[in-house]
Image: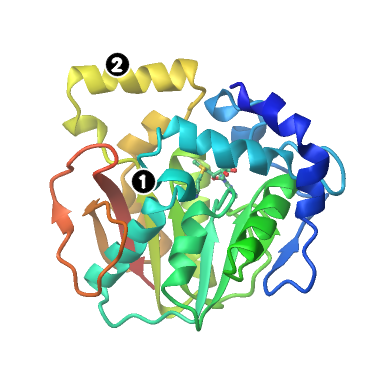
Amino acid sequence: MRLAPVVDRQIDELMDLAEIENPKGSVRVNPDLEVPRYISAQDIHRMPGNYHGTYGERDVRQGAVFDRGAVVYQMGRNGGYMNDIRGHTIISHFFSRWPEGKPLRILDMGCTVGHSTLAIASYFPEAETHALDVGAGMMRYAHARAERLNIPVHFSQQNAECTDFEDESFDLITSSAMLHETSGKALPNIFKECHRLLKPGGVMAHLEVPGRYDEMDTWSRIRGDYEIQYNYEPFWKGAITADFDKLCKDAGFNDIAVGYQDATVKAERGNTQFGGPSKGVHRSWLMISGVK
Ligand SMILES: C[S@@+](CC[C@H](N)C(=O)[O-])C[C@H]1O[C@@H](n2cnc3c(N)ncnc32)[C@H](O)[C@@H]1O
């Protein structure tokens, strides 16, 4: 990717811009965090430095690289420069199943620079929104971006499999395109961690790529294999063959739903855009949701 040199040319200015006076949200980094090997072993999407690379105490490099890289990778089809349609789609799913839902504490796992997080938080201005990912530079950039877009979020550098949040401390836990970048071993740990963190009656809602291996035609399978081999997405196939219903049940969830939600730029309460067939990439997303 040729974005890294563009960021490197401007890195001093970007680090200065990331120093926020009187922030409404916060950022917490953990230099001792052990980055899971399914992330550290290779540069996912061939992004140099991957999600977790960090180059000093004020660094924001990987956040800047991802912020622009994701828009190029999606060719603008996920909400242009905001890259946030997936966040709106998660809340559209939440509103389709729980039209009266008003979470007061929200956690977005695998948030990267917060593209989806800010869309999610925008529907619940009364709520305290938290978000986590594994890179310190990524979290610093996400924090600066959220502050400059005036949406307070509390970012922390943590592993979604085992966070430091208290039991039963969230009403809604989300993730967007995180599960296919973990591993078969990590998936049950993440679902169990969501269950531990949710209050009774709280909702988990994960968004994933809009295809199941069994339903794909040959060309889509070949394209997927190309992603795995050449775009360094080693767990993509594991995610699209995973038995999400069982993972939810094994973690203790009830009222489970696994199905397609239409992509949207604005979530409406009581919408009926869940449960039909996949309309394909960027038109639908797979949602996996359940209640504690
Ligand atoms: C494709 S990106 C997600 C994009 C982002 N959620 C959005 O919608 O814009 C996948 C993210 O999941 C994160 N991730 C994967 N496994 C994780 C884990 N165990 N703990 C925290 N973050 C994780 C990666 O570091 C990466 O930032």
Query: What numbered label is drawn on residue 222?
Result: 2
Q: Is residue 150 left or right of residue 156?
A: left
Q: Is residue 206 left or right of residue 95?
A: right
Q: Is residue 238 visible?
A: yes
Identify the image quadrant of residue 226: top left
Q: Which amino acid lies under the numbered mark 1 shown in the image of this protein?
A: Glu
Query: What numbered label is drawn on residue 208?
Result: 1
Q: Residue at x 68, y 38 (%)?
A: 62
Question: Total of numbered circles in the picture?
Answer: 2
Q: Residue at x 63, y 56 (%)?
A: 145
Q: Is residue 55 left or right of residue 35?
A: right
Which quarter of the rendered picture does the N terminus lie within? top right
Residue 186 position (above or below residue 4): below
Element type at marker 1? strand
Q: Residue at x 25, y 23 (%)?
A: 220
- Residue 64 position in % (x across, y down): 65, 41
How packed is label 2: few (under 14 Cα within 10 Å), some, or many (20 or more)?
A: few
Q: Residue at x 55, y 51 (%)?
A: 110
How packed is label 1: few (under 14 Cα within 10 Å), some, or many (20 or more)?
A: many
- Residue 3 position in % (x across, y down): 62, 27
Is the residue indicated by label 1 positioned so its CB lies within 8 Å of ligand 1?
A: no
The Cα atoms of the two marked residues, 2 and 1, are separated by 19 Å
Q: Earlier in the sequence, mark 2 or mark 1?
A: 1
- Residue 152 position in % (x across, y down): 61, 71
